[in-house]
Image (cartoon, rainbow, N blue to C red):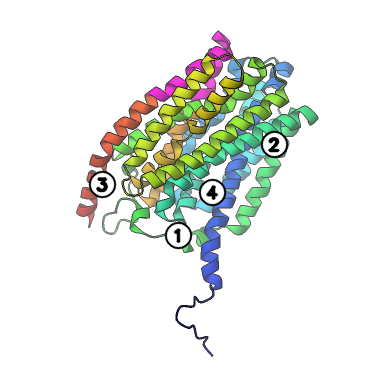
Amino acid sequence: MAMQVSAGVTAPATPLARTRRIFPWVVFTLTFGLLLSDYMSRQVLSAVFPFLKQEWGLTDTQLGTLTSVVALTVGVLAVPLSLVGDRWGRSRSVVLMAVVWSVATIGCALAAGFGHLLTARLLIGVGEAAYGSVGLAVVLAVFAASKRASLTGAFMAGGSFGSVLGVALGGALAAQFGWRAAFTVMGVFGMVLALLYWVLVSDRKLAAHKIDDEADAGPKLAGGQGRAKLSTLFSTPAVVLAYLGGGLQLFIAGSLFAWLPSYFNRGYDMLPAKAAKVAAVFILIMGIGMIVCGVISDRVGKTRPINKWTTAIAFSAVTVAFLAAGFSLKPGGLQMLLLAVGCFFAGGTTGPTGAMVARLTHESIRATAFGTYTFFNNVLGLAAGPLVTGVLADRFGLETAMKYVPLVAVAAIILLIAGRQAYPSSIRKLDAAAERAA
């Protein structure tokens, strides 16, 4: 007998309905967890800088190179491997990438010298190259488009949270058991998450829960065209400026990730383990800022998407003001306060610029679009920041080098302002192309 439902009474949720509500959050949780592993494997190195410097006598340039080689490899391989993820299957790609970077991280623990460690770090970059882009594309596909900036900011914040865990836990493990143990723990953690992802997420499940609405798909395709052309990744000035402005802003975040532990170690005479813990707090603040800034951007841009550009510009401006002032002061409480505010906004542009990339590219090549975004984030930001700062530190000292880092935001602001100005005409260009395709 069929169950009768009286007026005004909501029928109990069916198992299918509950699954449709729960599965996207399972996807987000596991994908976010793997991003934590990604950055834990990447940034644990910063916590063991003092140990490597003492044991192997490495220069700051060499230490910066060990950090930057991962981001540089990610930048170079992000687009081609993201394209493979779009074509081969996103969930399968995620699992394979996680296994590669986890095994390479364990390989770091076995390194016998600088050359061995550099090679293992390069392989970590190979594994991580397309993860941010493919993982973010997976998440955005199962959520409504109205949450793009919030989800992008929250997802990218996983980099900060993973860096916190990598630096803090790595520093503690290195102090207690040696620096090799720090790499081993990070690698095992990644392998466990990769296994969980393989069991719980598949391309078939992702397709069944995909959100198919006009706003999510991006620009329309011509009749009969199943996949957008790769040329559309650069089809408008606005999307190019989003790549460039967002990437350049992350120069600051990359420098902070890599050098804050050493900055506190040298500037405040802290022991390596304590310096790592203090730096972890500031990186945590950066991650929280990414989430908050993403939510702000979604709310401010709810009725006028162009306002997301405005928020990105504002976040970048606050970053340069507070970090430049903070690094100009002598070590102390006031400096700590200014640096904390600057760190909060340093990664705030990731949410709005990521949302603009999603709006200006089609869903069928979104992992590749985010791979392009990742390329600029890493080459201009996460790779360049640690390396350039290390070179400057060898020449002028680390405290002086950090004074120059925030000034890169000035160039980012100029690019973001240009992107805001180009956005209306870029949207009109996409709309005109959609009308011709209809």
Circle 3 residues within 10 Å: few <14, some 14–19, many ≥20 = some
The span picked out in magenta is 384-410
Residue type beneath disc 2: Ile
On the image, the x and y values in percent for residue 438 come to 22, 57
Q: Residue at x 72, y 26 (%)?
A: 273
Residue marked by disc 1: 210
Quote the CA–CA distance across marks 3 and 4.
30 Å
Numbered tag placed on residue 93 in the rendering = 4
The count of marks equals: 4
Residue marked by disc 2: 106
On the image, the x and y values in percent for residue 88 come to 48, 51
Residue type beneath disc 3: Leu
Residue type beneath disc 1: Lys
Residue type beneath disc 4: Ser
Q: Are marks 1 and 4 in contact (CB under 8 Å)?
A: no
Between tags 3 and 4, which lies in front?
3
